[in-house]
Image (spheres, helix red, strand yellow):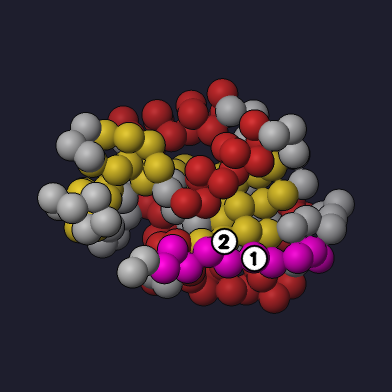
Amino acid sequence: MIITAGEALVDLVPHAVLGGGPMNTAVACAGLGAPTAFLGAVSTDEHGDAIWAHLEASGVDLHLTQRRDEATCRAEVIGDPSTFRFHGDGTADRLVEIPDPGLLEGGPHPLHGGTLGIFRGPAASVLAEIAETIDGIVSLDPNARP
């Protein structure tokens, strides 16, 4: 099973669009028929409910996905499509916790982590710890932009 780890957020462009590199990767892998799980924290707010439903409808396994009462992170496009303002302090995606090790058994599991999740707060530490212990290839997407 491919595990993607990181944020699931809402892009405001100017209307809300579900996004986040790791979530998009999970949906794409599941769409290609690969067993895929999303490891992250998703809010219980309206945007989080939409993200959860989207992952579920896309065939992504949610046994590693945590629900949190904190708000969903939002990425707001400012004029130029490559310029963002993030509204992410104290949001659900930053507060993911290390899952029960038993939930990661049955590997090897490729792990893909990326974008905000590998740089921000507690989520970055969780991803680093899982990357050190998981039985499988680890890939990282730093979301580098010019």
In the image, residue 94 above or below residue 122: above
| Three-letter residue code for mark 1 | Ser
Q: In screen coordinates, is 12 left or right of 36?
A: left
Q: Residue at x 56, y 23 (%)?
A: 57
Residue 62 image offset from top left, x and y in percent? 61, 38
- Give, as a single range, the part of the protein colored magenta: 135-144
Q: Which residue of the protein is positioned furthest toward the left in this rendering?
A: 79
Q: Is residue 62 visible?
A: no
Q: Is residue 143 magenta?
A: yes
Q: Which residue is mark 2?
A: 113
Q: Is residue 90 visible?
A: yes
Label 2 vs label 1, nearer the camera: 1
Q: Are marks 2 and 1 in contact (CB under 8 Å)?
A: yes
Q: In screen coordinates, is 74 left or right of 21?
A: left
Q: Is residue 133 magenta?
A: no
Disc count in the image? 2
| Quarter the C terminus occupies | bottom left
Q: Residue at x 38, y 37 (%)?
A: 18
Residue 130 image offset from top left, x and y in percent? 65, 68
Whole-Å distance between the Cαs marked 2 and 1? 6 Å
Residue 88 image offset from top left, x and y in percent? 27, 57
Disc 2 crowd, CA 10 A, few/some/many (<14, 14-19, 20+): many
The overriding secondary structure of the stretch rendered in magenta is loop
Disc 1 crowd, CA 10 A, few/some/many (<14, 14-19, 20+): few
Q: Which residue is mark 1?
A: 139
Which residue is nearer to you in this view: 39 or 142? 142
Q: Which mark is residue 74?
A: none
| Three-letter residue code for mark 2 | Gly
